[in-house]
Image (tube, helix red, strand yellow):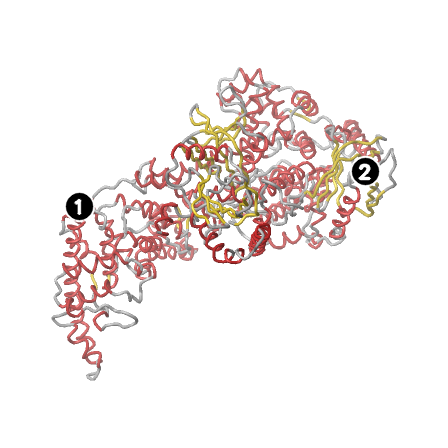
Amino acid sequence: MWIHPEEVLLAGALWVSERANPFFVLQRRRGHGRGGGLSGLLVGTLDVVLDSSARVAPYRILLQTADSQIYWNIACGSSRKEITEHWDWLEANLLQTISIFDNDEDITTFVKGKISGIIAEENRLKPGEEHEEDSGKFREAELKMRKLFGMPEEEKLVNYYSCSYWKGRVPRQGWLYLSVNHLCFYSFLLGKEVTLVVPWTEVTRLEKNATLLFPESVRVSTRDTEHFFSMFLNINDTFKLMEQLANIAMRQLLDNEAFAADLSLPKPSKTLKNVSALKRDLDARAKNERYRAMFRLTQEERLDGHTDCTLWTPFAKMHVVGQLFISNNYICFSSKEEDLCQLIIPLREVSIVEKADSSSVLPCPVSISTKNKMNFLFANLKDRDFLVQRISDFLQRTPDSSWGDTNLLSQISHSVCPSQLASSSVPPSSSPGSESLQKAHPEKMKEESWNIHFLEFGRGVCMYRTSRTRELVLNGIPERLRGELWLLFSGAQNEMATHPGYYGELVEQAMGLCSLATEEIERDLHRSMPEHRAFQNEMGIAALRRVLTAYAHRNPGIGYCQAMNIVTSVLLLYCTEEEAFWLLVALCERMLPDYYNTRVVGALVDQGVFEELTRSFLPLLYEHMQELGVISTISLSWFLTLFLSVMPFDSAVLLVDCFFYEGIKVIFQVALAVLHYNMDALLSCSDEGEAMTILGRYLDNVVNKLTVAPPIPHPHAQLTSGDEPSPEIDVFDLIKSSYEKFGSLRSDVIEQMRFKQRLKVIQSLEDTAKRSVVRAMMTESAFSIEELEELYCLFKSKHMTSCYWGSSSSAAERHDPSLPYLEQYRIDPLQFRQLFVSLAPWVCGGHNPTLSARLFRLLDQNQDGLVNFKEFITGLSGMYHGDMTEKLKLLYKLHLPPDSEEKKGNLTSLTWRRNHSEAWPNRLTPDLWSVLEVKDYRYYLRMWAKEKETKRETIKDLPRMNQEQFIELCKTLYNMFSEEALEQQLYHAIATVASLLLRIGEVGKKFNNGTKKRETMPQTSPHSPQGEEEGPGHGASGESEVCRALADAQLEVVAPQMSDEETKDDASVSSYSVVSAGSLQCEDIAEDTVLIRGGEQRQGSVLDTDWSITFEQVLASMLTEPPLVDYFERKRDIQAKMATCKAQRAVERQISSASDHELTRHST
């Protein structure tokens, strides 16, 4: 590649000149290519250990002048071919021109300008923008990575670091390359090369530790081994990037979504040294995620920038130091001291942004006013003018929303407000007693406290959030304010404000739709808080149905999961349907990520975090609970329903208050407090049931003594109540205790622990899926458990590789988590061909692509262009473990056209079963149903099961094979035998069998033609020229005609019905032609055969359409030849094939340069 000219003082140091002219020198790096000796080894070691932009490429071209001792590096190359192209261009285009210059400085200036112009033109013509953003040094490192590890252009390097890799007890200094999908390491020390490639999807553990043996190291664990890397210049930066890339890989395994670069990322003002566009992208994503989590903002929000400043707090009469964050829709502030002050200002609420007068007391202030007459004063801003301009730009793009006026939900007649649900839940009372007045008094006091807070700190989305706000939340939110504050603290209010009418549209779209999610929703509707009066009537049930079905329609990836009904029913008690919907969105997509997907991954991750926290805070109890296996049992129900299903409603709803304000840390704190309170009793437990009873009884007696509503009976209270009544526990005491004992928990620490557990959980789920697939396939294939596990890993890796390196079909089409494990992962024809070539026992050389395409067509029964693992193993097992009959039957079916074989062999039985199963409900008339009620129904069930049974295909069901298909079968067999030890015996045997089958087909043709002639004689015209031509063809020389056609089909390139891939197999054509001409003993072939050139076609090359044979005839003929019987009965081992396939790196569309040896040979 051309590079911007760089000065080189010592042209000969560590380099060897290979070509030279008066102005240019082509050099090769010592230690690269052939030879080199000890000096080459030393230079190669230095290049790896002390890598730099000048030493990345092994070839370079220098500009030299006669009077100057300074050289200029103008081009470099990773291969001889690349650098030779540049050299040839220089000699052809510049050498003659610069020879006329008199001044050496003019030559240097001219060449440098020309090279810079070429580079600028190349960058302008490149379609990808990120190549322009990356520095030249980084692009060279990316090229080196692709060459070293055989990666295609689709694999993008994110960053690379100098480090040591510990192989045994010896550290190997080299370079760690972190790409989007792989972790790679390369080292070359004194002739010893170390190359390591680890896909991120195979990483099970990633942690940073410091021990005596591995100081300041990073441990990367896979299922098979562990790798240690140390001696980083900045280990924290490296480890954060590794965490991000591993997280992306886990998301691939979970959602099957490939990494997509952020195209809206703003370009830097200048090219950053050693920082790629992808690295900037990932850094921006990490900042965005922290920003969104801190202020509970939507996934679309992108941080534009942040700066230090102070905020004037009128309630405290002081300036608070913190950071100001600006994004496309919000202005946010967070104090440096935790919980001192937090502020969120949506730009849709901003009315005025102005620069206030600056003074020594208040330097560079900016005043922001909102539509509800609140003013915020920020000061000590470093670049105030730029900040105000950015805010103005975002304000111009912000639509003036009036979301409350156009609410499509008002058009839905069935919408329910919380007051209606609440009224249905309160029983009629005659006169309030003193007890109810006493309970109502604390509720009134709480409302008054919140009203005072609103007057002092503001109300709505722009409210100041301080430690005082947290105190009020921990004391319980009043019933009347609960819905409003839940929306505020969760961020759902902002999302609802920016999507007016969205919920109403979803309800209308989902109305009447039927899916698996809606069926599950209908099943669980009446299980949602059945003890509450609000859901003992159709009004509450209908509202719950609309919210759940609307969310399932919005997010089909989650759809519906058990426990969503319980949480949503509680939300509906305090919010309108639309508000409950947006609170559910905030829960499922932001506050409890991945909790409610099909595999409840998020809940399992937090279960692992809870176990780790228990081990840290309660080590004695943790060991005992692990022996009993209690933690994994209890935590899932606690987290999925936020204690709503295990605690009395009035108490659990207070935990929900704290959860919406503090996040998941409150749930962890309370769970730890529950275990701590019952620690003595749990330590004395001897089994899991006793421990569960203790915890269940404790949670049932957590009461809220200040509630106004009548007590709601808990469904599990009777199951856990003992003979003696358990003491009541005040829920406020439980919350206070959780903050006193475990309040040191931080959200960032929890997120770090979540990452660690996410790797473990997702890989554990993948292992469970693999075991399920292997168990299911054990009965359907003869492969061993170990072989099936290896094959599953190879199949899955091929699928995953296609996800991030592209394929003919999208990832969503190839992966469906709702399907059984056997059918989830699917591959397309290209990936199938690669596996077929690597694993199939039949090696057919250039005929492999054709055979692979035919086998794919045969296995793809639903004709969707994809094959799942079950179908793949079915085809592979037939080739490896079938007897001779099964293997020949598979080969026979591979050479039948799709309309004859698939419809008759596979699809007929499936269609028959489907039609009959669909017809069953129609046949069960009312009279028949009455008979079913009287008679034994098991008889009809047996009839139905018999109809659904798969009918076993016999060899008689296979259609006949015509002459063209028979020729293709012979060609395949000749290719299969080309690498066998008994090649000549097999050729002779198949030639004898082919000759015999040709005669059998001739006899059958004569018999069939005789029958047809008697049937169609009156209809045939006596003057038909076709009849005159067919006369001699059907006489005694029929076998010769077929032999001639068979030979012609091999000798000639023209084959109208053959695919392009089939016609490319020149080796099989020539071998078959020789054997067929010599072994079939057809004397007239030599006389009549003429090779076709151009477009001419001889009359003898026309195939006989009446000729056909059956599979029984093929099988019987094969059995007469012992070499063929031995070949097909021989047991074959797949272990060697799998080892080769595993060792071979899975690289599609690999773009790697040719070796120096090959290029030298071609050039000479």
In this rendered view, identify the residue nearer to me: 849 or 150.
Answer: 150
- Disc on the earlier residue, 2 or 1: 2
Q: Secondary structure at mark 1?
A: helix
Q: Residue 1023 sits in which quadrant?
A: bottom left
Between 852 and 564, the one lying in front of the other is 852
Q: Indicate the amino acid at tag 1.
A: Asp
Rounded to the nearest angstrom, the CA distance separating label 2 from label 1 is 88 Å
Horizontal and vertical percent position of residue 966: 23, 60
Q: Position of residue 653 (x, y in %)?
A: 67, 32
Q: Is residue 399 something one can see in this rendering? A: yes
Residue wearing tag 2:
378
Report the side of 1003 relative to 65 (left or right). left
486 on left or right of 131: right
| Label 2, residues with CA under 10 Å away: few <14, some 14-19, many ≥20 | many
Please tell me which residue is depicted at 38% across the width and 34% down the height of the picture: 37
Residue indicated by mark 1: 1126
Asked if 1007 appears above or below 791 in the picture, the reply is below
Horizontal and vertical percent position of residue 206: 51, 31
| Picture quadrant where residue 974 is located | bottom left
Q: Is residue 600 visible?
A: no
Secondary-structure class at tag 2: strand
Q: Give the residue displayed 78% in from the left and 38% down from the top.
A: 382
Residues 347 and 859: in front is: 347
